[in-house]
Image: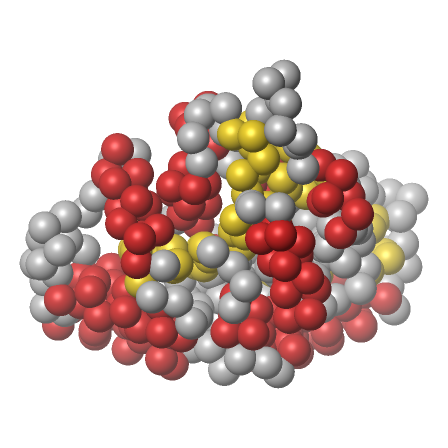
Amino acid sequence: MLRIDLRSDTVTQPTPEMREAMARARVGDDVFGEDPTVNELEALAASMLGKEAGLLVTSGTQGNLVSLMAHCNRGDEVIMGHDSHTYNYEQLGAAVLGGIGPRVVPNQPDGTMRLADIEAAIMPDNVHFGISRVVSLENTHNRCGGAYLTPEYTDAVADLAHAHGLKLHIDGARIFNAAVAQGVDVKALTRGADSVTFCLSKGLSAPVGSVVVGSASFIKRARRVRKVLGGGMRQAGVIAAAGIVALTQMVDRLAEDHAHARRLAQGLAALPGIEPEPVHTNIVYFRVRHPFYTAQTLQEALQKQGVGVLALGADRIRAVTHYGITAADIEDTLAILQGLLCK
């Protein structure tokens, strides 16, 4: 059992208040639209992100797939970054299940795609080509070090997409981290989007679930897609109850995770053979340049000491701070690394 688990914020344990809310949740059949707690969560999520309606889904991956299938027909294309989660870690589900092709353009180190690259990727109206239908952004951006997209950039992409008749989808798995890091209302990051998916089960600490938000007509289509994907749930209020606690109690505390991540990166920079990348939110990537360790062997050595991190490639490791990770845990992790690297 890992004592300090920094592999991902998906390992976050629910709070006592969540467990209590789950035990007391009022429930009904959600497929019939009769679960009052699910309905409350969906309305709350939509309101917080400035949209008309919401839809509870099982995961962020399902939320992205539901959104893209609700926006697109078979043979349509989605413009997305080459480092995006949707392209790299979701088994190309939109293509496999929806017949939707990815049109991939380069992500910049800050998680953005250049506007010129997005515009160049929009297919002309020609019988030989697929139809460009959606631009997909990721905020915060996992593989780009937890970098956040700004309101100004997101607005610019929305304007570009809409000028060409395309929709904007945001994979906002950690969009509340992006809002807290910038000190802005989350609505500023979603106002131009036609759909947004965000996770309850990462930094917000709920045990399961994500929410898709958008217009009422979009959510009506998305609900049909969720059903065909097997995502229709019954007495789902026990899940939604934790999500309500997440949205009402756990957003502001994300700043603690960001502070812990900065401290971890600061300590890593002082260790031999370690090169931390810039830290933006709660994700810390660092390179292993040590003569006796690769990323994989350092991960294994840390695991033996009760610390979990995630090796990604030969020399890159990810550590993610979250609820349950304390300042003392960060100092203990750095002390353990000091002992391993300075033998």
Badge count: 0
Q: Is residue 171 visible?
A: no
Q: Is residue 225 visible?
A: yes
Q: Nearer the viewer, residue 103 or 338?
A: 103
Left or right: where 230 falls relative to 203: left
Relative to 43, residue 9 above or below: above
The residue sitting at 54% across, 39% down in the picture is 133
Relative to 204, residue 251 above or below: below
Left or right: where 170 falls relative to 330: left
Residue 241, by quadrant, is bottom left
The residue sitting at 80% across, 64% down in the picture is 278
Q: Position of residue 100 (x, y in %)?
A: 50, 29
Q: Quadrant of the C terminus?
A: bottom right
Q: Nearer the viewer, residue 268 or 59?
A: 59
Q: Position of residue 6 (x, y in %)?
A: 59, 59
Identify the coloring: secondary structure
Left or right: where 204 falls relative to 34: right
Q: Position of residue 52 (x, y in %)?
A: 33, 66
Q: Position of residue 170 (x, y in %)?
A: 53, 54
Residue found farthest to the top: 128
Relative to 84, residue 241 above or below: below
Q: Nearer the viewer, residue 328 or 73?
A: 73
The residue sitting at 54% across, 52% down in the picture is 168
The residue sitting at 30% across, 34% down in the picture is 229
